[in-house]
Image (cartoon, helix red, strand yellow):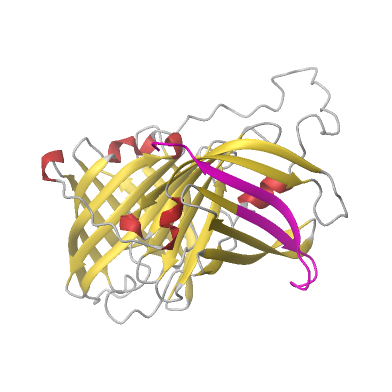
Amino acid sequence: MRPLIKTLSTGTYRRAARAFAPFCLFWVICQPLPGLAQGKPAPSDNPAAGQPAALRDGQHDFDFGSGTWHTHIKRTVDPFDARSSSIELDGTVSSRTVWGGRAWLEEIQADGPNGHWEAMTLFLYNPQTHQWSMNFLNSQMGTLGAPLIGAFDREGHAELISGDTFKDRAVLVRGVWTKISADVHEYAEHYSDDGGKTWKTWFVGHKTRVPASEVKPVPVVANDFDFDIGTFKSHSTRLLRPLTGSTKWVETDGTTVVSRIWGGKGNLAEVHIEPPFGPIDFLALRWYNPTARQWFLTFANAANGTAGVPLAGVFKDGRIDLYDAEPMDGKQVLVHFAIWPTSKDTGASEQAFSADGGRTWEVNYKTRYTRIPGK
C-alpha cells in the first residue's frame, strides 16, 4: 500500500512527477526485427568471466498479499516535527496478481476524519534487476508520481527507495514491508532529509486478512473506455524506421485482454504481440484524473517491468486522442496515440510521431481489434 499523495487535511504538497523510462510502444517501434540485428558479440574464451552472481527470482514476492485485507492507517502530518498530530483511517485493501504474474495490483479505500479516500498501487517486476517498482495513484488527484524501487531480501522483508519533496524540501523516501505472515502484514513509509542517516516514520498501514465470506463487491462506475473491455484478437502494421522517409511496413498479429480495475476508474490492457515483431508482452494502465478531466495512459514492457511516460487526452465523439513528448535518437518528438470503437465488437488504434512540433504527423503503428466471442 502506498500512502496518500495529498494530505487529508489542507493538502499542502503532492508527489512530484518525475521522468520515466521510455514509452513502451515507442520502444516497440524502435526495435529491430529478428534477423536484422547487425551481428552478434564474439564468444568469450572464459564463459564465466564477468558473469554477476545469480539473483533470486522475486516475481512471486507479493503472493502473500493475495486477497482482501482490513487496513488500519496512521499517518503523521509532519514527520519532522515531534509535536505533529496524526490522522487515523480504517478501510479495505484488495490485492491480486495481474499480467500473468509480472505485476501486482492493490485497490485501496479507507475512511477517516476527513472523509473517504481511494487509491491504487501497481507493482511492476523487472526481471533484469530483480526489483519491484511501486506506482501509486490517488483517485482525488489522478497523478502518477515517481515509483519507489527496491527488492525483497531472502528473509522476506522488502525495502523500496525513491526521492520526493515534502513542503518543498527534497527528501528520501523508504517503503518497508515487515511482520509478514499468512493473515497479517505491515507497510510503513519513512522520510529522510539527511541523506538516509535518520528516518522519520510518517505512514504505517497494518493489514489483517478479511475472510472470503465477508468480502463485499466493489461497485463499478461506467466510463468512456467500457467499449474496450474484453478479449480481442489484434492485427497490427508497423512502419520500419519512422521519421526517416521509410515506406516499408510489416505486419503481425496478437491478443489484447482489457479488464476494469479500481471500480471502473481505470483499466488494464495486457497485450501480446506475435512474430515478426515479437514475441513481446506489454501492459497498458489507463486511468481518469477527475481534477484535469483527462484520461492518462502509460505502458510497461515485460523486458524491464518499468512504467513509461504517461500520455494524456480526452474523449470526443467516442474517440480518445492522447499526447506526450519523448526523446528519439537524441531529438525530442511528439507522440500521438488514439483509440476508438468501429463497431460493438471491433476497434482501432494508431500511433504517430511529429518531429516539427505537431505541424505534421507520420503514422507508424496501426492496430485493428476484433472481440473473441464469449470473452
Q: 11 or 340, which is in the foreground?
A: 340
* 226 vs 135, nearest the viewer: 226
Q: Position of residue 322 (x, y in %)?
A: 58, 65
Residue 52 location, x and y as percent?
Answer: 62, 29
Q: Quadrant of the C terminus?
A: top left
In the image as oriented, which residue stretches furthest toward the front? Answer: 343
Q: Quadrant of residue 91?
A: bottom left
Q: Viewer-proximal residue, 299 or 203?
A: 299
Residue 286 part of the magenta-drawn span: no
**Can see residue 133?**
no
- Quadrant in which residue 63 is drawn: top left
Residue 179 pos. (x, y %)? 24, 42
Left or right side of 352 for 61: left
Query: Whole-percent x and y of residue 312?
Result: 55, 67
In the picture, measured across the screen, residue 40 lies left or right of residue 29, that is right
Count of numbered tags: 0
- Looking at the picture, does residue 240 appear above or below residue 15? above
Kindly give the residue lying farthest to the left in the view shown. Answer: 214
- Residue occupying the point 18% across, 39% down: 183
Q: Hey, which residue is sitting farthest right in the picture?
A: 245
- Between 185 and 300, the one nearer to me in the picture: 300
Residue 372 in the magenta stretch? The answer is yes
Please give the range of residues in magenta: 349-375
Identify the residue at image location x=52%, y=59%: 297
Q: Is residue 346 above or below residue 15?
A: above
Q: Does residue 240 appear in the picture of this structure? A: yes
